[in-house]
Amino acid sequence: MKQKLLPAILAQFGEASDRLGLSDEMRTLLRIPYRELKVEIPVRMDNGRLKVFIGYRVQHNGARGPYKGGVRYYPSLNLDEVRALAMLMTWKSAVVDIPFGGAKGGVCCDPKKMSSDELQRLTRAFISKIDLIIGPSRDIPAPDVNTNAQVMAWMMDEYGKHHGYTPAIVTGKPIELGGSLEREQATGRGCVFTAFEAAKLLGMKLEGARVAIQGFGKVGANAAQILEEAGCRVIAVSDSQGAVYQRNGLPVSKLLAHKKKSGTVVGFPGASAMTQEALLETECELLVPAALEGAITSKNARKIHARLIAEGANGPILPEVDPILEKRKIFVIPDILANAGGVVVSYFEWVQNFQHYAWEGQQVNRELQKVMARSFALVHSLAQKEKTTMRTAAYMIAIEKVARATDLRGL
Ligand code: NAD
């Protein structure tokens, strides 16, 4: 499924560029990543054997600010996936109007089969290999699939060995090392903010609404908790091992504790088991795909019952699916808007690091709410004006900003 992401994003880019009347020259400039680095990462494993991993960092566009984007650890990661995700980051930062460009990175590895010491050695070796292209005003990594605050702490420490104390080199760090309050919840919270904006628009009451969430990681689990606090019923949740369902709502904190203990949501006492596919087709008002790319295909799109979809993950809906959902009057909040909360609070973290001053959590959430509501309104108003989807409108806003910045810098 993943190999479809790059053509999908390029097709979306093409459609938005057509509407904007973007020149061929500018299209070429914006399609091709600025820089791609592939590195070999030799790691001495706990059993004494040397294993060689492959890592990537792709910097797509830095016209509006330093490159910014997560690092994922995933066995089947490939360069096209990283390219696609880097490009998405450029559009995401632009659509919410924060001064970052777009990048993405990752290592082909299965962290679930590695010890913490092995992961630390891998992370340090990766950072030392990409050291020449990153920097607090150049390219700032962050957590993504299978990486977390601990991984960011190792990255910061490794980078600091050669450059001195540099907390702004990564975001999503532990609070004790200069991380921002509320960063961990930010992607999920931003996603919820946009869902509430959409619900207002559709005249839907989210209080008491049924929610299904695919993926129970940093994005999905935090969205679940925030939605529950807001009065929604989180009736179905899945992870890589299966899915669980409870008609009256799953108690999210208890489900989190169960996942922490057993490593999965599967087997949660009192819940019924369901397949991962069935979760997407659950009768609910809000669906949050927060796992990996390509979850919603032209096959299952016709079986989706949700009224509203907020794309917590990057690229969970393949573009050929958008017209099906549109026809079925399912309102989609596109990834570059719905999950931008993470990069917005990463920006706040970066600003705090430069200021050497920590904001209060309430301030972070308040500022995030403002950015998400303002961006949602702008995208929706353009979608109305252009009589197009929220996705195309979001791309149009983003591409126009990046093209303008590129132009102003001079070719
Ligand atoms: P994560 O590793 O913390 O969580 C991923 C979750 O998805 C895990 O619970 C995993 O078990 C589950 N999963 C994997 N395969 C699945 C499947 N087939 N069916 C159901 N669940 C499955 O990762 P994350 O950081 O939460 O990222 C999730 C998505 O959100 C990715 O697309 C990522 O790029 C995107 N995203 C993350 C952030 C962030 O701040 N972490 C920001 C923006 C976008």
Image (spheres, rainbow, N blue to C red):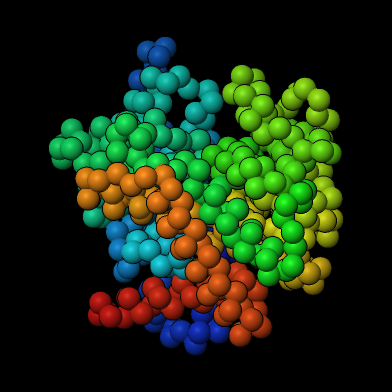
Residue at 40%, 14% in the rendered image:
46
Q: Does residue 104 appear to the left or right of 336 in the view shown? A: left
Residue 97 left/right relative to 405? right
Q: Quadrant of residue 234?
A: top right
The reply to whether residue 314 is visible in this rendering is: no
- From the top left corner, tell me how far across and down residue 390 is, in percent: 62, 71
Residue 284 at what x, y percent from top left?
Answer: 80, 51
| Side of 96 where 282 appears, left or right | right
How many marks the image carries: the answer is 0
Please identify the residue farthest to the top as the structure is shown: 47
Q: Position of residue 324 (x, y in %)?
A: 77, 67
Please say if 121 is above or below 38: above
Residue 387 in the image, given as x and y percentages of width and height: 66, 83
Vertical side of 378 occupied by 238: above or below: above
Q: Nearer the viewer, residue 3 or 347?
A: 347
Task: Give the residue drawn at x 60%, y 53%.
Answer: 192
Whether residue 187 can be seen here:
yes
Name the residue: 22% across, 50% down.
Answer: 355
Q: Residue 229's image quarter? A: top right
The quadrant the C terminus occupies is bottom left
Which residue is rendered at x = 40% and y = 51% of the image?
363
Name the residue nearer the viewer: 165 or 107.
165
Picture layout, residue 121 above or below residue 204? above
